[in-house]
Amino acid sequence: MTISPASIFGSPALLSTTPAAQSAARRLASIEAARGAACLAVVLYLTLGSLPAAELSPVLALALGAFCHGWLGVHVFFTLSGWCIAERLALAHRRRESLPAFLADRIRRVFPTYWCVLFVALVLVVAASPLNGTPVAAAFPAGAAGWFGDLTLTHLPLAQTPHLFVSWSLFFELSCYIATALALAIFHCVGALRSAVLPLGAILCLWPLTGFQFAPLLALDRWPDFFFGALAWRLVRAPADVSAHLALRLSALYLGLLATRDLPAAPTLAAMATAGALFLSSRLSIARSHPACWSPSAQFPSLYLLHVPVLSLLVNLASRLFAKSSWAFALSCLLALASAVVTGCLLHRFVERPFEALRRRRIAPAR
């Protein structure tokens, strides 16, 4: 789950006194636009990706071809999160926020909405059990390890299959928060090592190239995505920072080594393109703040988490009623997509926003 800039930066009233906050506000438009486009790509990819292309109507087959790479939107989210969490780290350091307070704030941002979506997903799977001919017990996580992994988002290191399909990405988000907390500790306690944080982050990008599998370090598999976003933010904020330029050279080394390995390069290229676009838009002053309006990005966490359970139930039902090559099935897929968007908006309005309001009230005095 990637975090909305509004929740990371706080409200304009709280941050308007600092130049950094004004810069963040100018960048908000480009970040929100990128998040909205990536959200749309991911949702459409997961709507159509499981369908057999050969059996679809021409319209659905065309849409499937157009969004066959929509899964890369997740890596765009990761890079945007890296950019935003770098700004959040700077704010935490300026106000001398403690590590427990920082991590508690991040936990409150992620888990309440996630747990609500997990509950809804369980209800939907139970409701779909008669359609699938499966026992109700199969709708729930398997054993204590499965429950623990789903409730704590540690299913990947525990080698458990996540019950909520897209929740694997939240594990990497939380891991990024932990890494940010370690950087905050260095800033607070070991100021002399501050200039080593970015080069160390670039060195950690090399870990996925080793091919060594170690469960506690599984989070580093997608670390480069987050790091590129954080590095781009730093290069905009402090163009003359020697450590940032050293990290940039180390990142180039990572890319050169990646080209020599038999590893998928598309996620890294998507992350690089996102970081580059944010850097250029900020340096060229393309992005400007804009009035609040509805966009997929505004409802992103709720829509991203909830759309798979809703879509899978409705598309599965449609496939039993209509031939996949029929216009009725294409219309059913469109209605399923609309239903996912509506339920995501409702969850955002009645669950995510109230929890977010409570979280902001808790941290407002510290700012």
Image (cartoon, rainbow, N blue to C red):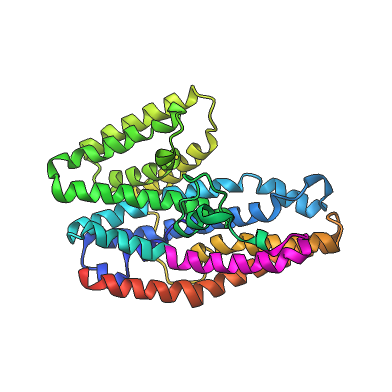
Q: Position of residue 43 (x, y in %)?
A: 61, 57
- Residue 210 left/right relative to 98: right
Q: Residue at x 58, y 47 (%)?
A: 71
Q: Residue at x 78, y 54 (%)?
A: 59
- Residue 83 left/right relative to 327: left
Quadrant of residue 245 within the rendered picture: top left
Vertical arrangement, residue 4 with respect to residue 293, above or below = above
Asked if residue 357 lies in the magenta stretch, the reply is no
Q: Residue at x 21, y 49 (%)?
A: 185
- Residue 125 left/right relative to 211: right
Check the image and name the residue furthest to the top: 260
Asked if residue 127 lies in the magenta stretch, the reply is yes
Q: Position of residue 216 (x, y in %)?
A: 40, 41
Residue 90 seen: yes
Q: Position of residue 159 (x, y in %)?
A: 52, 44
Q: Residue at x 54, y 61 (%)?
A: 305
Identify which residue, 207 or 248, lies in the foreground: 207
Check the image and name the residue furthest to the front: 143
**Quarter of the image that includes the C terminus:** bottom left
Q: Position of residue 250 (x, y in %)?
A: 33, 30
Q: Main secondary structure of the magenta part?
A: helix
Vertical arrangement, residue 281 with respect to residue 204, above or below = below
Q: Which residues are magenta?
A: 111-136
- Residue 49 left/right relative to 193: right
Residue 281 seen: no
